[in-house]
Amino acid sequence: FTADTNYEWQIIAHNSAKLDKSGPVWHFTTALPGDMVQIGHGDTTNKHLPIEPFYRYTYSQSIYLASDFGEVGENKRISKIYYNYHWASNGDADCNDWVIYMVTTQMTEVDSVWFPVDGMTQVFNGSVGLDAVESGDGWLEITLSTPFNYNPADGNLIIAVDENSPNYTSGADDFYCSEDTRANVSRYYYSDS
């Protein structure tokens, strides 16, 4: 299900006399838990973010503006992050070795400069469990080993992902991203060596 989406269903009973009886139309609207924020609803692939599974090593930085978080209030504790993954190959344990960093910044783009890693907080270092994502499309849930306290009033959020597995997956495997009309909100580097 997609967040903030209205769904409807109806039951239509059929009997052996080929008579139909329609029940009422039922509906519900999906919502996220009050302490969860979803940024983006994309279905775009081949953006190499947060990693490029088809290469052995990947590093990326993405800026999330304070306004992306809506009205989340002050001092939010980020304890989990999720990425929507599409995979066609089997088992995807090949791209599991991630280090994730976060930092609050006044920067609004990362076009020509990387934010220095030594100025960031390491929030995760280990296996992300990519192989546990069900075949096809699924959400990769990453529980941070060090939750990050973020206050949108202090600035924007950078999330950096460093993937260090010496293996790679199928070229058909990728993460879903949202198109952004702002320039230079993410940058990446990937290599096989």
Image: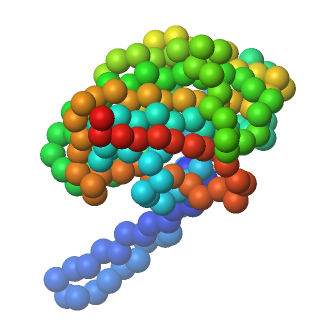
Residue at the spot 40% in from the left edge and 16% down from the top edge: 125
Coloring applied to the structure: rainbow
- Residue 129 lies left or right of residue 176; in this view the side is left
Which residue is rendered at x = 30% and y = 74% of the image?
A: 13
Please tell me which residue lies in front, 99 or 144.
99
Residue placed furthest toward the front = 193
Q: Is residue 28 above or below residue 83?
A: below
* Residue at the image point whose x is 51% and y is 36% from the top: 60
Furthest residue in direction top, as rendered = 146
Residue furthest to the right: 153
User: Going by the picture, which residue comes out furthest to the bottom?
Assistant: 18
Q: Is residue 99 left or right of residue 31?
A: left
Let me know if residue 37 appears in the view.
Answer: no
Give the image location of residue 184, x and y in percent: 67, 49
Which sits in the foreground, 11 or 174?
A: 174
Asked if one can make out residue 16 in the rendered structure from this viewpoint, the answer is: yes
Give the total number of marks visible in the rendering: 0
Q: Residue shown at 53%/14% (left/top)?
A: 122
- Above or below — where is 25 with respect to 151? below
Res. 79 image quadrant: top right
Residue 178 % position (x, y): 56, 55
Residue 25, percent from left and from top = 50, 69
Q: Quadrant of the C terminus?
A: top left
Q: Is residue 139 above or below residue 160?
A: below
Q: Which x, y percent locates residue 41?
A: 56, 54
Asked which quadrant contains residue 5, the reply is bottom right
Q: Is residue 179 above or below residue 189?
A: below
